[in-house]
Amino acid sequence: MWLLLILLQAAVLPAQLCEAPGEAAAAVRALSARLLGLAADPSRDPDPSVYLALRLAGDHDLRGEKRYLARLQDAFQHRYGRSLQAALRPHAAPHSHPQQDAVATEHTTRAEAEWPETGRLALYLLGLRATCPPPEPGPQRSLVTWLKYYLEEDWAGSRQHGHPLTSYYQYSLGVLALCVHRKRVREEVIRRLLAAEHHGRFGHAGGGAVDTEAVAALAFACLERERTVGARLAAELRAAGRRARRRMVEAQGPDGFFGNVYSTPWAMQVFIATDACRMQPAYGRAMAALLENLDAFTTAATTAQALPALHGRSYLDIASMRCREEPDALTPLSPELPPEVPGNVTVRLVVECPEPRCPQRRLYDRPVPAPAGASLLDVLRAAAVRGPHNFTFDTQDTPQGPFLSRVLGLEARQQKRSYWQLLTAPSTSLQMGVADYRPHDGETLILRLSEW
């Protein structure tokens, strides 16, 4: 009897929709149009996550998406398709297994693959799977082999350092991409991620890593759904996914975010992929918080992170996409320049480096005047032209915008798992990059060399 009452109660409760509510549809559509405008800029390097966001949206500009796909193929097929085939030709037997091919090409491809590009290649493969009509499978086979090779090269770092050479985020993306392509993933590869989840290794020196845990949980959900693993392993994957969702709910802040505004869409994808979004109040709070902060998504990369969740979609939906008639009326919106703000601000700029690398720890601490409305990047440029205390820095262009790579001669390197953490005093991590964050007058900004 009690079970019947529970079922009747659940039946009368309105199922929460996973996508943004109808009153927010115009704002979400505008965000899609703005991403389309950013994607149309030929000066920006093509980013597979941007293409994925365009394909998972509810509205489309099919010609614009086709042009963007051509740019992606230009960048990726030239690098991976042709070079890998050339590398395999002397070694691969006619009926050899792709994983054996990857091992056989280790020495011939090492010069070309000095550093695994696991995550970027995984996103490109996900993008190809989302294409309608799908491209010819031939080039994709070599890309899958490359990805398997990268996963093994990536894990080689764990034997020495205890973690992948790149990150668990990229490693999880690699597993997810293989699963979405319905490629069998070796049990050992899966168990590496399960062990990392079990032992809480997804965090970093600066705190937790919601986005990493979310991508791993998406990979777990995909592996369980595709039924390519045994019953025992499927049960472990299911339990790991439940733990990840529980931790996200417990860690949700009073502002509604899972971590911060940028990691929240990744966490929301987990609830969408597991159909937990419909009855989970934490998901509704996160959606509301996201809709209240759409102005935080200014770059192509951050906008691409937000859109799938706003449309109630996850990367797992790519596996079941079909070429049907798609709405084709989306018009690109040109990016808006930030308005000019009169006056000036003074920002205190601090540079910190931990011991033992830097015995003095605080390397720079000076007030820096800059025009009101200036970005953090503008503040760094202003500091660089001031004397007599010389301030130097370098940035590296990435699809996410300029990445702070060197400050006062100290370089942040992925190979050494170091980065320049951006904080506002005393220890609040910024939620934007150097080109997007706009400091206010009297604020103290800290550039801290950190490990992850």
Image (spheres, helix red, strand yellow):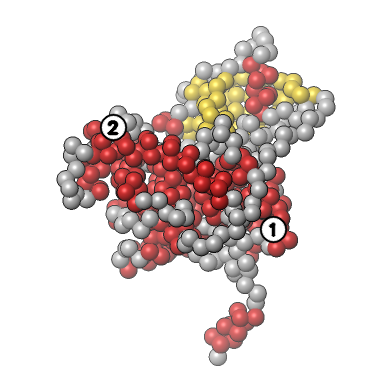
Looking at the image, is 76 positioned above or below residue 312?
A: above
Frontmost residue, 357 versus 208: 208
Tell me residue 277's x, y (percent): 58, 64
Q: Quadrant of the N terminus?
A: bottom right
In the image, is 62 to the left or to the right of 136? right
Label 1 vs label 2: CA separation?
48 Å
Residue positioned 74% across, 34% down in the render: 338
- Quarter occupied by residue 154: top left
* Relative image position of residue 196 (x, y in whole percent): 40, 50
402 with respect to 93 (left or right): right
Residue 360: image location, x then y, percent: 55, 19
Label 1: which secondary element: helix
Q: Position of residue 334 (x, y in %)?
A: 68, 39
Mark 1 highlights which residue? 25
Residue in view at x 72 percent, y 34 percent:
337
Q: Give the mark toward the camera: 1 or 2.
A: 1
Q: Could you tell me if residue 202 is visible in this image?
A: no
Q: Amino acid at mark 2?
A: Arg
User: Is 401 in front, or is 365?
Assistant: 401
Tell me the residue that label 2 is attached to. 110
Tell me the amino acid under the disc marked 1: Ala
| Dot 1 or dot 2, earlier in sequence | 1
Q: Quadrant of residue 168?
A: top left
How would you rate the neighbour count of disc 2 (Cα within 10 Å): few for under 14, some for 14-19, many for 20 or more? few
Q: Residue at x 62, y 19 (%)?
A: 364
